[in-house]
Amino acid sequence: MPYIAVTALSHVGLIREHNEDSLVVGPWTLCGTVTENPQTLLFPLGTPLVVAVADGLGGQPGGEVASALVARQLASLGPSLDGEEAVRDALDVCNQAVYSAARGRPELVTMGTTIAGTLVLADSLLTFNVGDSKVFDAAQDGLRQVSVDDSPPLAPGQRTTSAVTQTLGGSSVFMGVTAHVTVSALSTGDRYLVCTDGLTDPVPDDALDGLLRVYDDGRAAFELWKAAIEAGGPDNITLAMVRIGE
């Protein structure tokens, strides 16, 4: 019987004092805490399954509050999502929820979060994002980013930037979002990597590709995390490997 294997972890890294990342895998959420080892969950293929990471905005208050709110909102909405418009509507609901939670609370004003993830349906897979957290298709012919970074243009020689051009929340006045959503056919053996920039900023894409050509599931998640740590672990590291099996 076809199934979905999801292996995930979330770690504070080596520099940050707190983990402001959150993770949602179906009904399960991990918010602002740390996993000691990669955790693998199996789900039957057919029921809508959301796998996503949310990265609270650093340098602004309440990043962990915003990311946790969005993760829990998506966990609640996930089973009802059935296509592109439903995903866009869900992200609009999440955006409004972040602003509503901050309203009247000076300590949370301008809190915000990125979001990136997949919605696995019976015969298709949707990828979505707002902000600079990423989704990659880990295909046999090489790693390919399918999310779209909401970042300003990079200067010559610049590989990464912490600046983002849209997020869920993140402003003192309400701002709508235009989510990036892509629909793909689904096949047995497909693998996707969903992650925050705590992985992709210190570890170049070619290094990610090299690891994913060798490892899968729990070992892949561990080796990706290890690569980020060995590169200095400058930020929170949250990732999920999604694999379609039979």
Image (spheres, rainbow, N blue to C red):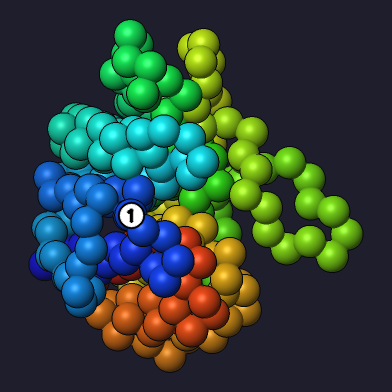
- The vertical placement of 26 against 167, above or below, is below
- On the rendered structure, is 36 left or right of 106? left
Query: Residue at position x 32%, y 41% from top?
Result: 64
Q: Determine if residue 8 is in view.
A: no
Q: Residues within 10 Å of mark 1 (few under 14, many from 20)?
A: some
Return the residue nearer the eye: 194 or 201. 201
- The vertical placement of 219 against 70, above or below, is below
Which amino acid type corresponds to the residue marked 1 in the rendered image?
His
Q: Quadrant of residue 35?
A: bottom left
Q: Quadrant of residue 3?
A: bottom left
* Image coordinates for residue 130, horizontal then vertical, percent: 50, 37
- On the rendered structure, is 134 left or right of 242? right
Query: Residue at position x 54%, y 79% from top?
Result: 231
- On the rendered structure, is 182 left or right of 150? left
Split into 4 quadrants, where in the image is the C terminus?
Answer: bottom left
Split into 4 quadrants, where in the image is the N terminus?
Answer: bottom left
Return the residue nearer the eye: 230 or 79. 230
Query: Residue at position x 38%, y 17% from top?
Result: 106
Query: Residue at position x 65%, y 43% from top?
Result: 163
Return the residue nearer the eye: 152 or 16. 16
- The vertical placement of 80 against 134, above or below, is above
* Image coordinates for residue 46, horizontal then vertical, percent: 17, 49
- Tell me the residue that label 1 is attached to: 18
Identify the element where label 1 is drawn: loop
